[in-house]
Structure formats: structure tokens, C-alpha cells
Image: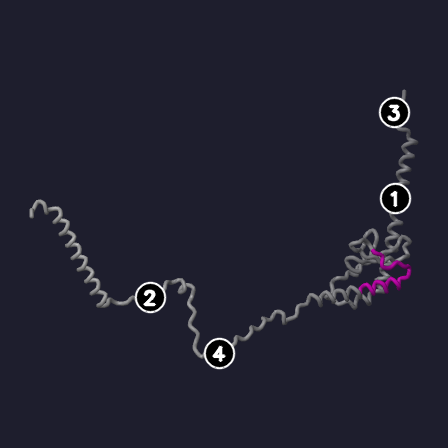
Amino acid sequence: MTDSRVPTGKSRRLSEVVREVKIAAAERQDVVVDMKEADRARLELLAEELMPIFDEVPDENEQFDFVISSGLQPRLWIDAVAHVQMGPDRRTYRFVRDTRQGRVVMAETGDMMRTADSVTHYIAERIVERQRFLDSEQVRPEQYEASPQPAKPADPSPHPRPAVRSSRDARAPVQRPTAGPQAGSTASGLWWFLFGAVVGAAALFIAFRETLGPALGP
């Protein structure tokens, strides 16, 4: 009869391997934690050296951070684009800055004092750049004042100028005065009326005479 169960010896060896893997993973984690703590300790020493410089920065200047991040790789942040981190050998300070062209290494040395000098110079440059920007954006108060109006020349004419009519008055037709009836024009009209009446009567008389002449006889 064949036993289909896994031999006890093989099961025991697998569990031992699993335990060994867990132990190795824990040891590697301890090493990473130790390196992280070592990097943070060195960055804290650099921050203490730079503390007098940090204190001299005006409070209204909010472009600097001056904090140590607690990530997988600790960093001493100077501002949003520049920070100090430890090199692969865990003894070299690397001062870098992120730009549009990529990351630029501004200083890389194992001397903490030289790194502090580089960071101090960078902070001074940023303060000067900010002051220049504020000076260029500042608007002088006199630019808001109204420009003076030029004085109008005096009218040399002693007579007052006629009043200017409005557009409504300009569009209104000009009313001309009409002359009253005169005696000469009335007499002339009456004479022409009488003349027309006489001419009309003569024409009627001639017309009736030509028509009724033969009937009346000589």
C-alpha cells in the first residue's frame, strides 16, 4: 500500500527554509533602518551647523523649508527645488537642485563645513533674486495719479461765442417768417381775374354766334 502523504522530513526542511528567508529579510530591513538612521543623523548635524543662517532669514520670506524629510532616503530640504542628501557611501554630502534641464549637483563633498558654505551661498542668492523681483514688480504711487489736464487758452475775442445747438435742434427744420398780404399783390390778382372773365365771355359769344348764325338769319 502506497502512502500519498508528504514525507515528514521534506516538510520539516521547507519550514526551515521559510524561516531562514524571514530571518534574512528582517536582517536586511535592520540594515536599511540603520543606514536610514545614519543618514538622518549626519543631516541633523549639518542642519545644526546651518541653524544660525536659517534664523537670519526674514519670517516673511516663505520660499525656504529647512526641514528633514523622513522618507526612505532622508533629505535636508532648503527650498522646494534644492536639498542635501547623503551619497552612496553614506559619508558624502550631496547638495543638488532640480531644474528644467534635470538635476544639477551644486556641491558634493565629505566635508560638512564646505557643504554648509555652499548652502549658505545658495540661500543668499535666492534672497537677492527675490528682492530684485519685488523691486521690479513694485509700482510707483505717482503712476496712479491722474495726469494734469492742459490749460485751455483764453478767448481773444471780446464778444461771447454763440451757443452751440444740440443735435436735436440741428435736425429741426428752420422756420422762415412769412410776409403778410400786400395791397399791390391783391389788386394784381383781381385784374387778372377780370381779364380772364372778359376773355371767356368773348370766346363763348363767338362760339354761339358761329353755331346759331344760320338759324337766326342775316
Q: CA distance from mark 2 to mark 1?
A: 116 Å
Residue at numbered disc 1: 25
Q: Earlier in the sequence, mark 4 or mark 2?
A: 4
**Which amino acid, by three-letter code, is at mark 1?**
Ala
**Which amino acid, by three-letter code, is at mark 4?**
Pro
- For the point 81% across and 63% down, the residue is 122
Q: Earlier in the sequence, mark 3 or mark 2?
A: 3
- For the point 92% across and 34% down, the residue is 13
In the rendered structure, the answer to whether residue 95 lies left or right of residue 139 reads right
Q: Nearer the viewer, mark 3 or mark 2?
A: 2
Element type where label 3 sits in the image: loop
Outermost front residue:
218
Element type where label 2 sits in the image: loop
Q: Which residues are magenta?
A: 104-123
- Near mark 1 (Cα within 10 A), the count class, few <14, some 14-19 or many ≥20, is few
**Looking at the rendered structure, which numbered label has been put on residue 156?**
4
In the rendered structure, the answer to whether residue 139 lies left or right of residue 164 reads right
Residue at numbered disc 3: 4
Residues at marks 3 and 1 touching, judged by CB atoms closer than 8 Å: no
**Looking at the rendered structure, which numbered label has been put on residue 176?**
2
- For the point 28% across and 67% down, the residue is 179
